[in-house]
Image (spheres, grey):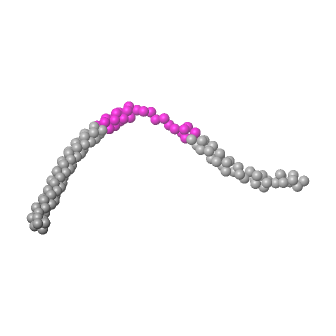
């Protein structure tokens, strides 16, 4: 008899279906969102495309094309400036390479001359010491 009373008590059913509560809430929310989008589609009003709209679109396209050509011209002039600057930088690099090579060759010549001068200055002394 007591087991029969257990099933008649509603708190037992509430405990039994507790894990299903989030699933039910999510499914109800999903159904309500689907219904909302269907209502929004029914309220949509179709606006006709007029000749004025077509003319505005043509004018906008013409303006965009003219701006595109202006931008292309500007880019070409900037590219020419970059090319001229790159040529100037290359000329400076060549000048620096030439200058450094001249300095290095002068240093090597100076070291060679110092070594030659020492040998020639020391030769009479070594001859005198050996004889």
> In the rendered view, does 92 fall on the left or right side of 18?
left
User: Can residue 63 be seen at all in this image of the molecule?
Assistant: no
Quarter assignment of residue 62: top left
- Of the pair 124 and 72, the residue shown nearer to us: 124
Which residues fall within the magenta stretch?
Answer: 38-66
Residue 58's spot in the image, x, y percent?
Answer: 34, 33
Which residue is at 40% across, 32% downward? 50
Left or right: 60 as drawn, with respect to 44: left
| On-image quarter of the C terminus | bottom left
In the figure, 119 relative to 39: above or below? below
Closer-to-camera residue (66/88): 88
Report which quarter residue 68 is drawn in: top left
Residue at 48% x, 35% y is: 46
Judged from this view, the residue extending furthest toward the right is 1
Residue 108 visible, this angle: yes
Is residue 92 depicted above or below 35 in this figure? below
Q: Does the magenta stretch include residue 41?
A: yes
Residue 60 screen position, x and y as percent: 34, 37
State the residue at coordinates (84%, 54%): 6
**Position of residue 53 measured from the top left corner of the image (x, y, whole percent):** 38, 34
Q: Which of 6 and 90 is in front in this view?
A: 90
Q: Which percent across, then down, holds residue 99?
A: 16, 53
Which residue corresponds to the image point at 74% horizontal and 51% vertical from the top-left? 17
Give the mark count: 0
């Amino acid at each position: 008899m007591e087991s029969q009373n257990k099933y008649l008590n509603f708190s037992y059913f509430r405990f039994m279906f507790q894990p299903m509560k989030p699933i039910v809430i999510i499914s109800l929310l999903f159904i309500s969102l689907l219904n909302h989008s269907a209502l929004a589609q029914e309220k949509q009003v179709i606006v006709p495309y007029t000749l004025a709209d077509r003319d505005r679109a043509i004018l906008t396209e013409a303006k965009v094309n003219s701006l595109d050509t202006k931008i292309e011209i500007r880019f070409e002039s900037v590219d020419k400036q970059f090319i001229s600057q790159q040529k100037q930088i290359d000329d400076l690099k060549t000048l620096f390479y030439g200058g450094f090579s001249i300095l290095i060759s002068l240093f090597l010549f100076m070291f060679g001359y110092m070594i030659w001068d020492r040998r020639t200055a020391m030769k009479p002394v070594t001859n005198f010491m050996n004889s």
